[in-house]
Image (cartoon, rainbow, N blue to C red):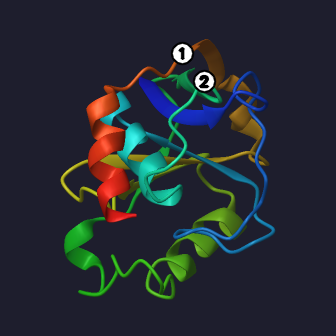
Amino acid sequence: MIAFRIGHKNYAGSLTASGVNGRWVSAGKPVIYCSENIPLAFMENMVRRQGVGFNHDFKIVFLEIPDDLLISTVEENKLDPDWRDPYDYSHCQPLGNKWFDDQRMPILRVPSAVMPECDNYILHTLHPEFKRIKLIAVTDLVPDERIEDILKKYH
């Protein structure tokens, strides 16, 4: 499987995690968030950056995940109705923190809060199987300038 993320050019060439607080895990748990396709990765990144920062500082990162790696899945229909709240991660973090702490599977598949019909993947950087995930390419991010123009109107 190929997964994608949009990363800052300073970090796009390596599989490192900052351990910052996120929707699915608390601060101090080093994970890498990625998406099932480039448009979703782009939308996730733009939401986090609040629609600003179109420039040459961001890259598309391609990750190869071996098909035999075990994946734990969070089903959207089993989540609290408010799980997508952009300011309250209390519905999702307990699930992600448990997955992280259990260390049974290197990948957690979760619905995207930006587009729940699509999936994001959370990679457990401390899991022994994480080393099998490979960064296979980094390319320029060159979105249509009209997208930024639209987003700037609402910023």
Say which residue label 1 marks: 140
Say which residue label 2 marks: 56
| Label 2 – label 1 distance at C-alpha | 7 Å
Indicate the quadrant where residue 132 lies.
top right
> Could you tell me if residue 37 is visible in this image?
no
Left of 18 or right of it: where is 99?
left
- Relative to the observer, which residue lies in front, 105 or 90? 90
Image spot of residue 55 (x, y percent): 56, 30
Left of 18 or right of it: where is 50?
left
- Relative to the observer, which residue lies in front, 50 or 103? 50
Whether 155 is drawn above or below 130: the answer is: below
Q: Residue at x 25, y 68 (%)?
A: 76
Tags 2 and 1 touching, CB below 8 Å = yes
- Dot 1 amino acid type: Asp
Element at label 2 = loop
Q: Residue at x 55, y 43 (%)?
A: 53
Question: Dot 2 surroundings within 10 Å: few (below 14), some, or many (20 or more)?
Answer: few
